[in-house]
């Protein structure tokens, strides 16, 4: 009972830190727009995921998406792979491939074909998630260049669960700045991870994670970056939110569905 009380208390504090968000769930996904008769190349703007989806709707430009993160996004049962298969099904004319980072070889693995497409155009998806990784993992040695060698339209950043009790996050800022300085520059999309809970996270660790989510949210706001907010939906679930997290960190299947819905909502949002 003490564990449950501490977890609920942490979620209550986290709710106070998080900004209120209203989520609207559509019964069906919008139908892709017809292919543009006179294509015009556009740079991705503040609503970068939705802008990229519009490019895919037009059906003539190649696209690349990269995720850098930890063990909440590396498995095929988790939200990012499910997002990748959703994109492949939504755009059957695209040849969609998925590559997972091999931490032992320090390179992306062979591509898995999610959608055969028509040969052209292509949608390339790179998953640089590594169990136990912190934001600083991508900055060590020559790893940043290897993880981000592919020119990407979007780079999603999903870190925090392995950072302990610290409420500040300088390594995340360094990584985000280095990505923004790349040429051509990708659109950086911070991912606000699910809250933490007992039994594997102490109250101070849960609070530290909540504070880092606030830091990331403010960074995104100051830069005009779109976020994928999986944090707030779990808070809105209340007590059920803690039951969606298997071990205090990793969401179960129902929790993955919550995270996936948050990601899809951002991609399907009306762009500016």
Image (spheres, rainbow, N blue to C red):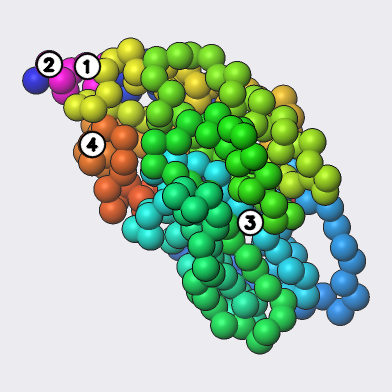
Q: Earlier in the sequence, mark 2 or mark 3?
A: 2
Q: Which residue is mark 1?
A: 6
**Secondary structure of the residue carrying numbered label 2:** helix
Front position among marks 1 and 4:
4
Between residues 157 and 107, which one lies in front from this camera angle? 107
The range drawn in magenta is: 2-9
Mark 1 and mark 4: Cα distance apart in space: 15 Å
Mark 2 and mark 3: Cα distance apart in space: 43 Å
Q: Are marks 3 and 1 in contact (CB under 8 Å)?
A: no
Q: Which residue is mark 4?
A: 247
In this picture, residue 36 sits left or right of residue 67: right
Q: Which mark is residue 2?
A: 2
The part of the image, by quadrant, that contains residue 7 is top left
Q: Residues within 10 Å of mark 3 (few under 14, many from 20)?
A: many
For image coordinates 75% across by 42% down, the residue present is 46
Asked if residue 114 can be seen in this view, the reply is yes
For image coordinates 78% across by 51% down, the residue present is 44
**Residue 49, horizontal then vertical, whole percent:** 66, 52
Q: Within the magenta stretch, is there residue 247?
A: no
**Secondary structure of the residue carrying numbered label 1:** helix
Between residues 208 and 227, which one lies in front from this camera angle? 208
Q: Which residue is mark 3?
A: 65
**Residue 141, horizontal then vertical, whole percent:** 62, 34
Mark 2 and mark 4: Cα distance apart in space: 16 Å
For image coordinates 64% across by 48% down, the residue present is 146
Q: Are marks 1 and 2 in contact (CB under 8 Å)?
A: yes
Front position among marks 3 and 1:
3
Between residues 178 and 77, which one lies in front from this camera angle? 178
Q: Within the magenta stretch, is there residue 5?
A: yes
**Residue 239, horizontal then vertical, whole percent:** 24, 31
Residue 60's place in the image compared with 3, above or below, is below
């Amino acid at each position: 009972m003490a564990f449950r009380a501490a977890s609920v208390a942490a979620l209550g504090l986290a709710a106070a830190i998080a900004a209120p968000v209203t989520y609207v769930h559509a019964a069906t996904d919008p139908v892709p727009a017809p292919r543009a008769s006179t294509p015009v190349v556009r740079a991705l703007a503040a609503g970068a995921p939705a802008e990229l989806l519009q490019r895919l709707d037009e059906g003539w430009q190649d696209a690349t998406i990269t995720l850098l993160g930890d063990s909440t996004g590396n498995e095929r049962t988790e939200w990012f792979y499910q997002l990748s298969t959703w994109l492949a099904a939504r755009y059957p004319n695209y040849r969609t491939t998925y590559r997972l980072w091999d931490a032992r070889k320090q390179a992306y693995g062979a591509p898995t074909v999610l959608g055969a497409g028509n040969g052209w155009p292509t949608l390339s998806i790179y998953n640089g998630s590594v169990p136990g990784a912190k934001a600083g993992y991508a900055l060590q040695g020559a790893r940043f260049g290897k993880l981000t060698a592919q020119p990407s339209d979007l780079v999603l950043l999903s870190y925090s669960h392995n950072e302990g009790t610290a409420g500040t996050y300088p390594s995340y800022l360094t990584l985000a700045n280095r990505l923004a300085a790349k040429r051509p520059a990708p659109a950086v999309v911070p991912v606000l991870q699910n809250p933490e809970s007992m039994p594997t996270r102490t109250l101070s660790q849960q609070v530290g994670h909540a504070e880092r989510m606030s830091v990331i949210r403010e960074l995104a706001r100051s830069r005009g970056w779109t976020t994928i907010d999986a944090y707030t939906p779990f808070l809105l679930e209340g007590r059920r939110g803690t039951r969606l997290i298997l071990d205090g960190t990793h969401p179960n299947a129902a929790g993955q569905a919550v995270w996936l819905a948050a990601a899809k909502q951002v991609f399907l949002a009306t762009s500016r």
